[in-house]
Image (cartoon, rainbow, N blue to C red):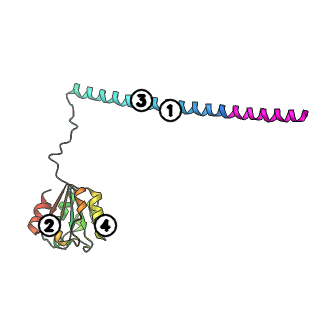
Amino acid sequence: MGNNNKRNMTIGSNNNKMVRTLITGSVLAITTGLLCWAWYKNSVASTQNKDQDDNKQNNKKNKESGKEKNTVIDTDNKKPSKCIIVTEQINNITNVNWEKLLKKDVVLLLSPDISKIHELNEDNVEKANLSKVIHCETGLGMWACVKSLRKDQLICMPSDLEDGIPDDIKHFVKQIIAVDSEESFKKASLDV
């Protein structure tokens, strides 16, 4: 009988130790979490205050020196960005200065049936601008490029496009310019 009491006391004291350990661990974890959160909030707030103070000092210096800078960008004078789908008829248009176009905010998407622009001399184009000529292997790929580029204007010749212009493209460009002749293409593309 004495052994049973000892065993019960040992089991009871082990349970008490386990409960105390769990409670102590939980309290430490919660305390550590709260301290980390408070430290993070404090450091973020001090960084924001420092940035605001720096901005105030810079504004004060600019006003004192009379050189307050206008940080508003005038978008009214900005030329629209363009995406031109080069199809067979557009590729056959003569006297288009493709090199000059590529210096502007223009991307040329070569439709699947076009491998090269006839009048584009790649030696005269800066290397950075050559990346603006994108060879599309499929029609789906071409329209995916149009969607991801999100240019202001899309210039294309719908009669040259096998399935026409997809309905949802109007959600990805501000303006679709459908050209039907050499003159209308030159007018639309050269207005850069």
Quick one: quadrant of the C terminus? bottom left
- Give the residue at mark 4: 141
Disc on the earlier residue, 1 or 3: 1
Image disc number at residue 96: 2
Residue 149 pos. (x, y %): 27, 57
At x 17%, y 43%, the residue is: 74
Q: Disc 2 and disc 4: Cα gap in Å? A: 25 Å
Q: Amino acid at mark 4?
A: Gly
Q: Which residue is mark 3?
A: 45
Tell me the amino acid under the disc marked 1. Answer: Trp
Q: Specify start and end residues of the magenta stretch as a single range.
A: 1-21
Circle 1 residues within 10 Å: few <14, some 14–19, many ≥20: few
| Label located before the other in sequence (1 or 2) | 1
Q: Is residue 90 magenta?
A: no
How far across and down, in percent of the image, does residue 171 sit?
Answer: 24, 56
Q: Which of pointers 3 and 2 lies earlier in the amino acid sequence?
A: 3
Residue farthest to the front? 1
Distance of mark 1 from mark 2, alpha carbons? 62 Å
User: What residue is pinned by disc 1?
Assistant: 37
Amino acid bearing label 2: Val
Q: Quadrant of residue 22?
A: top right
